[in-house]
Image (tube, helix red, strand yellow):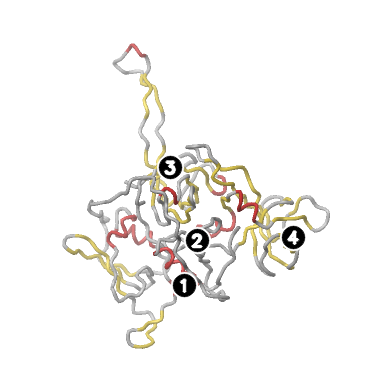
Amino acid sequence: MLPRAHTRTAKLALAGALAALTAGCSLNPFGGSDEEPVPVTRAGQEATQPVSIARSSRQPVQSGPIITTTEEVPIADNAPDTYIVKRGDTLWDISAMFLRDPWFWPEIWQVNPQVENPHLIFPGDRLSLIYVDGRPQLILERGSSMARMSPGVRVIPLEDAITTIPYEQIAAFLTRAAVLEREQVDGLPYVLKSRGDHLISSAGVSLYARGDIDGIGARYSVVHIGGPLRDPDDNKVVGYEALYVGDGTVRREGDPSTLFINQSSREILNGDRLLSQDVVIPLNFFPKAPARQVDGRIISVVDGVSRIGQFQVVVINRGERDGLATGDVLDVERAGDVVLDYFSDNKLIGAESVQLPSEKSGNLMLFKTYDRIAYGLIMTAQSDIRVGDLVTNPE
């Protein structure tokens, strides 16, 4: 089940998430990883206890060859010499400004060694593109708008750090959809029955719920467990889709607890499960190409739409066991059709079947990884993207 939040302060959460990500940790709210999850909350919320971070001892299965690049980093044709970071920027946007391919960002990222945490970039910071021995580098100069407290010491509001991907694009997903393993489904709190004699419930109704439920005021999404999600390569079940049906607030603690339903998108049934809205998600990491060769497929899209566009969330059938991590960028390709060639010189075989090549339709960035699956945010979409499309290392 979703872990409870360990803090409600955006400053500690962002700093902790960055520490975990730069140490190579995977943040998984449903799996059995060894690391401490880091909750992300928004500014203005109060702290309850400090964040603790530990490295994961689990190593990914080396299922593909390690990729090393010696090619020259492609700089964007109109890359600026300097850029002042603005509020609302994301690391992806800034990367695309300097680079033709944003996932080459780690190859050129250099910072002032006096900066304690180089992975934090703030509005007002100056990024400068320079060349050292003919190779491009980006260096960081801290903006002058930060409050100086004493010589050499400045106070930096951590919640102001730019994020890698736009938070608002995934915030709704985080409380409205998930893919869960069977054991995790069984461990979630559940709707026992509605108040009264209703078999189904909707907004404005109180429910009785059992399980490990947080205290009064805690918010939960109510989800219906859908059918199994299978890997098309081996037909094995990799999880179950949790379909959002509503959300509510705990009004009374106990066994059972009372949950008031604030809104609903469909009927809530007895037995539906509860997901805490105190979610865990990394917001700061570097876009990069995977370290290993990856060949997979999109197996699900959040909200069940048939055609996928920019900033929609998808699930792929590759994960940590394949060497994937948060920040990895993958190309999305539409598999080519098989067509009949009636014009071949070989008249004896009649029409010949020809497999057309796959064509790139966009790319995605992974922001949450599991053992066999991962969540990705579509960053660009040159054409329609669909479930079943291929995902592979960026060209």
Instruction: Compare marks 1 and 2 and give the one earlier in the sequence.
Output: 2
Q: Amino acid at mark 3?
A: Gly
Q: Is residue 382 visible?
A: no
Q: In the image, what residue type sits under mark 1?
A: Glu
- Badge nearest the viewer, 4 or 1: 1
Mark identifier at residue 296: 3
Q: In the current view of this chain or complex, which residue is farthest to the front?
A: 57
At 23% from the left and 51% from the top, the residue drawn is 71
Residue that mark 4 sits on: 204
- Residue type (three-letter) at the residue carrying disc 2: Asp
Q: Secondary structure at mark 1?
A: helix
Q: Residue at x 50, y 41 (%)?
A: 387
Pinpoint residue 23: horizontal percent, then vertical percent. Answer: 40, 64
Q: CA distance from mark 4 to mark 3?
A: 43 Å
Task: Write down the quadrant of residue 31 in the picture.
Answer: bottom right
Side (left or right) of 29 relative to 356: right
| Marks 1,2: beta carbons within 8 A | no
Of marks 4 and 3, the one in the foreground: 3
> Toward which corner of the image does residue 140 lie, by quadrant?
bottom left
